[in-house]
Image (spheres, grey):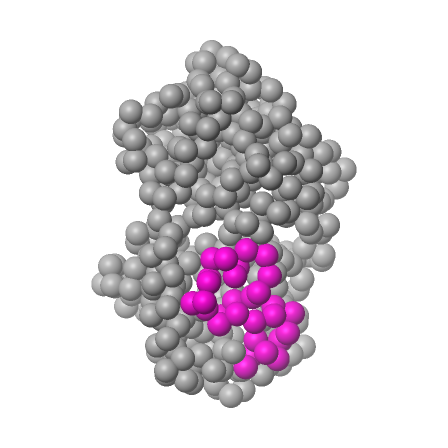
Amino acid sequence: MHIAFNGWFWNQPHTGSGQYIRQLLKALRQLDSTLRITLVLPSHVNKNPEDIPDGVEVVYGSSGRGGNWGKLRFEQRSYPALLRQIQPDIAHVPYWAPPLSTKPARLVTSILDLIPLVWPAYRGGLLAALYTSLVAASADGSAHIITLSEASKLDIAERLEIDPLRISVTPLAADERYHPKLGRENDEHVRQKYNLPDEFVLYLGSYDIRKNVNNLLLAWTYAGPSLGEAIPLVLAGRRPTKWEQPLFPDLDEYSRQLDIERYLMWLGQVEEHEKPSLYRLAKAFVFPSKYEGFGLPVLEAMACGTPVIAGTQSSIPEVAGNAAYLVDPDDARTMGAAILAVMVQDDLREHLINAGLGQATQFSWRKTAQLTRDIYEQVMLT
């Protein structure tokens, strides 16, 4: 069986789509070395890219210099043209941008989330809306659709009007470097680099509106004064170059209005290899997001042995199970009380740590690869 992957996001490992394709290809090769895999990369990616798993073939399709038009050209012209040349059995597009045709290959599409359809603020201008319409129409031509959670499957079935029997869930997993002990020798270096205090609560992620960090700041008006300045809320992740409504509310101004600046530490973007140390160093991790296709940070924190406070919406309860303190992400007072409870109640913290470690073991990339390979076999029989 020969699978040809659209590799547009291969050189963007900081994105969810980039992490997904890298981990999936690695796990598929480890699961079945006889599976032939071709990675179709856009021409603007450097030749001989790093981290290609052994045995994966690489070909290049024209994309100009990248950008939105280059991306569209690669997805709808270059990738399908290469499929006709290399003649794979299955064309797998590991993000929501399937071409209108992949014939003769059967098309499998991974839809990681439906953010532009669920959240109007993400739809952008006319061109973005036209692009969303194009890929929504293309999705119906997929032989099968893969998604990451039952919540996302429900969204896809309802909003794209696709038969649920054509949609399968393949949950993600935390990378093996997210571990309570492995790599701990780097923790003190990370603490010193960012001048982190002995105790802190961590948020790690982006700052767009669905992440709901504004409500976390409001929750900190209840938790911060009780914990004091010595135990701050540490916010890690790339900040936008400009706070701009409606997608990026001005969190700097909001924190000033709330008078909580003295309780906050903004780290900015952190390196991927530093993230496990940040989770381990934190006394608690809070993830107030209102919409996730999966919610991998919850699992990463648990795998590092860090207690998690998270929201009750979208896919988060599926990922967290009974191993996190789940609260209504719109209820700032309850969120603040949950943070305080986890920080001051040792028995609660220990319970969440142990439960989280157990929950994280329920997910693995090998399981994800096996489920994905089963889908390929199912598609070949139809």
Q: Residue furthest top?
A: 85
Q: Which of 352 and 237 is in front in this view?
A: 352
Answer whether residue 311 is magenta in the image: yes
Q: Residue at position x 30%, y 35% from top?
A: 31
How many numbered marks does the figure carry? 0
Give the camera-side residue of 305 and 359: 359
- Residue 302 drawn at (x, y percent): 38, 63
Q: Position of residue 163 (x, y in %)?
A: 63, 36
At x 34% / y 34%, what residue is drawn? 28
Q: Which of 204 and 84 is in front in this view?
A: 84
Residue 70 in percent (x, y) is at 59, 27
User: In the rendered image, is residue 355 in sight?
Assistant: yes
* Magenta-span inclusion, residue 208: no
Q: Is residue 253 above or below residue 61?
A: below
- Residue drawn 42% across the image and 36% down it: 372
- Tell me if I can see residue 256 in this picture: no
Residue at 38% from the left image edge and 21% from the top image edge: 1
Which residues, given as a range, are shown in magenta? 309-337
Q: Quadrant of residue 191?
A: bottom left
Q: In this view, does 156 lie to the left or right of 109?
A: right
Q: Position of residue 377 (x, y in %)?
A: 42, 27
Relative to 170, is 314 above or below?
below
Residue sticking out furthest to the bottom: 226
